Image (cartoon, rainbow, N blue to C red):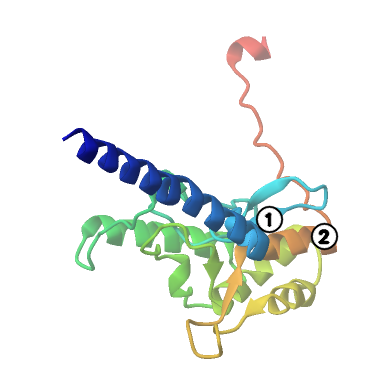
Amino acid sequence: MRRELVIALRVTLVTLALTGLAYPLAMTAAAQALFHDKANGSLVHDEKGAVVGSRLIGQTFVQPGYLQSRPSAAGNGYDATSSSGSNLGPTSAKLRDRVVADLARLQKENPEAPLPVPNDLVTASASGLDPELSPAAALWQVPRIARARQVAPERIREVIEARIEGRDLGVLGEPRVNVLAVNLALDQRLGRPAAPPAPPVAQTHAAEK
C-alpha cells in the first residue's frame, strides 16, 4: 500500500508540474513571442502612449465630433464582464420602444443624414461588445461629425474610407470599420473637437435677489 501511495504521489506531482506549470508557461511564452499584441488584449494607445481601449471591445462615444457606436446590452454598455445581448425578440414591446427612441435621437442629432438609418445603429450585437460598424453606418454619420469639427464632409469621409477593413481571407465576414480606430485617426488628422457648451444654469429667485 505504501509503495502504491508513493507512486500515485509521484504521478500527481509530475502531472501538476507538466500541466499546471510547464505547459501554461510555455504557451504564455509562445503567445508573447509570436502574438504579443493579441496576447495582451489588442490594446490601442493614443499619441502619448496611454491605453485608450482595445480593438476588440467597443466603447460609447457621445460627443457629436466622433463616430458613434452601435447600441450595447452588455451591462451599462460595452461592459466586458457582462457580455450579452438583450435576448429581446422581434415582438418585444421593450425592444420596439428602444429602437423607436434611438431612431428619434439619431434623426435629431443627424438632420443632414439621409434616411433610412442603417440597421446596425439601432441594433445591438449578440455579445454587446462589437467594436465595429458597417461602412454604411459609419459614412452615414459624416455630416454630423463634419459640422461638429467645422470641416468639409469630404475630409471626414476620407478618414473613414481609409480605414474600411475588407472580408477576412477575402470571403469571411463583411466589410467593417473599427470605431475607436477612426476616432483616433480623426483626432490625429484634425485635432480634438471643441467640447459642446455647457447648458445654462437656471437662476433661482434667491440668486436673482
Q: In which quarter of the image is residue 187?
A: bottom right
Q: According to the image, label 2 marks what residue?
A: 188
Give the residue pinned by disc 1.
44
**Residue 72, position as x, y percentages in the image:** 43, 55
Percent of width and height locating residue 145: 69, 63
Which residue: 29% across, 62% down?
Answer: 96
The crowd level at tag 1 (other Cα within 10 Å; few <14, some 14-19, many 20+) is some
Name the residue type under label 1.
Val
Q: Tell me if label 2 and label 1 are in contact, CB under 8 Å.
A: no
Residue 67 appears anywhere in the view: no
Whether residue 48 is situated above or below residue 27 in the rendered picture: above
Query: Relative to 186, does residue 201 appear above or below in the rendering?
Result: above
Q: In this view, does 58 lie to the left or right of 187?
A: left
Q: In this view, does 103 lie to the left or right of 204?
A: left
Which residue reaches farthest bottom?
170
Left or right, residue 65 beside residue 74: right
Label 2 or label 1, whichever comes before in sequence order: 1
Q: Residues within 10 Å of mark 2 (few under 14, many from 20)?
A: few
Return the residue nearer the eye: 123 or 112.
123
Q: How many labels does the image show?
A: 2
Q: Is mark 2 on a helix, strand or loop?
A: helix
Q: Which residue is drawn at 50% across and 77% down?
A: 115
